[in-house]
């Protein structure tokens, strides 16, 4: 059994790891949710040869594996959540890192100056950042994944089965829909393969118990935040 450590009250970056663990049927304990953020902070502070910089991190077989894409690469190779060949694994890792870039940009829309300051302290800068993200960056990311799917088929890794990158793209689309519902309604018709992939992941039988449970936390005060003044057609 693995130990996943992430903050207890937000889906955040930990949710990308949870989706892989759940869809893969991999036994794990969600330690932050079970024991609280104070225990998480204490665990992060303890001495170890491979300390994490920040959550999420996975403790597995004596290893502490941090960074979302790194955790997913580990799970992908060990549990068959990525292609079996080296080229396929590198491709899926590349996709995951691109998703991570998009996630960071979505976060920086509402915290463009200082991640430690409140959104209300940087609203003019956030409005400017949001405009650029809405008008150029969202479509650029979606176009990349659209081209990948058009080249590979139903799943980003090719073949007949999903990979962890497919699960993460599902989560990215969900987050963008929450944060920018007006803009996504305008953009989505132009990216049918990406939206179809989102729907396939949402319908995976292995994910239904998790997606329909209260363990699947809603978006809110995390990476993806909805401020109506930052959204637009």
Image (cartoon, helix red, strand yellow):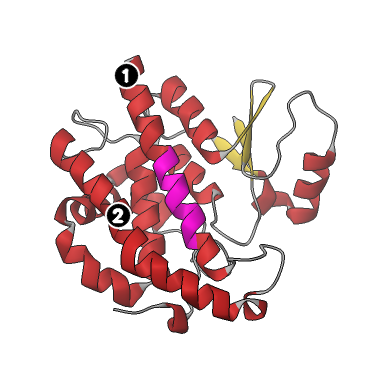
* Left or right: 146 as drawn, with respect to 163: left
Please report the residue visible at 28 percent of the width from the left and 59 percent of the height from the top: 139
Residue 117 inside the magenta-drawn segment: no
The rendered magenta stretch, by its main secondary structure, is classed as helix
Q: Mark 1 or mark 2: which comes first in sequence?
A: 1
Q: Is residue 23 above or below residue 227?
A: above
Q: Residue furthest bottom?
A: 229
Label 2 belongs to which residue? 140
Q: Nearer the viewer, mark 1 or mark 2?
A: 2
Please tell me which residue is depicted at 63% across the width and 66% down the height of the picture.
113
- Does 105 appear in magenta? yes
Q: Quadrant of the C terminus?
A: bottom left
- In magenta, the rendered stretch is 97-106
Mark 1, other Cα within 10 Å: few <14 / some 14–19 / many ≥20: few
Q: Quick one: 2 or 129, which is closer to the camera?
A: 129
Q: Quadrant of the N terminus?
A: top right
Q: Residue at x 39, y 46 (%)?
A: 168
Residue position marked by numbered label 1 in the rendering: 87
Q: Picture coordinates of residue 52 (x, y %)? A: 71, 36
Report the side of 30 relative to 144 (left or right): right
- Please state the horizontal and vertical placement of residue 4, each as a whole percent of the image: 61, 40
Mark 2: few/some/many CA within 10 Å (<14, 14-19, 20+): few
Q: Secondary structure at mark 1?
A: helix
Q: CA distance from mark 1 to mark 2?
A: 24 Å
Q: Is residue 80 left or right of residue 46?
A: left
Looking at the image, is 216 positioned above or below residue 220? above
> Where in the figure is residue 138, as x and y percent of width and height?
34, 60
Viewer-nearest residue: 214 or 69: 69
């Amino acid at each position: 059994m693995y130990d996943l450590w992430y903050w207890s009250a937000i889906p955040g970056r930990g949710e990308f790891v949870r989706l892989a663990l759940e869809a893969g049927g991999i036994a794990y304990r969600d330690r932050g949710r079970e024991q609280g953020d104070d225990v998480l902070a204490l665990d992060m502070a303890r001495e170890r040869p491979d300390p994490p910089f920040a959550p999420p991190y996975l403790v597995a077989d004596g290893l502490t594996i941090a960074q979302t894409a790194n955790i997913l690469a580990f799970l992908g190779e060990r549990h068959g959540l990525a292609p079996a060949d080296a080229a396929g694994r590198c491709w899926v890792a590349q996709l995951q890192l691109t998703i991570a870039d998009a996630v960071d940009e979505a976060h920086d829309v509402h915290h463009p100056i200082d991640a430690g300051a409140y959104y209300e302290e940087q609203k003019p800068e956030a409005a400017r950042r949001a405009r650029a993200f809405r008008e150029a960056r969202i479509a650029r990311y979606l176009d990349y994944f659209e081209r990948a799917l058009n080249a590979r088929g139903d799943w980003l890794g090719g073949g007949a089965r999903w990979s962890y990158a497919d699960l993460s793209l599902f989560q990215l689309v969900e987050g963008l829909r929450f944060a920018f519902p007006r803009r996504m309604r305008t953009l989505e018709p132009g990216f049918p393969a990406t939206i179809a992939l989102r729907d396939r992941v949402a319908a995976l039988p292995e994910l239904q118990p998790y997606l329909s449970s209260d363990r699947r936390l809603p978006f809110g005060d995390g990476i993806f935040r909805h401020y109506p003044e930052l959204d637009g057609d």
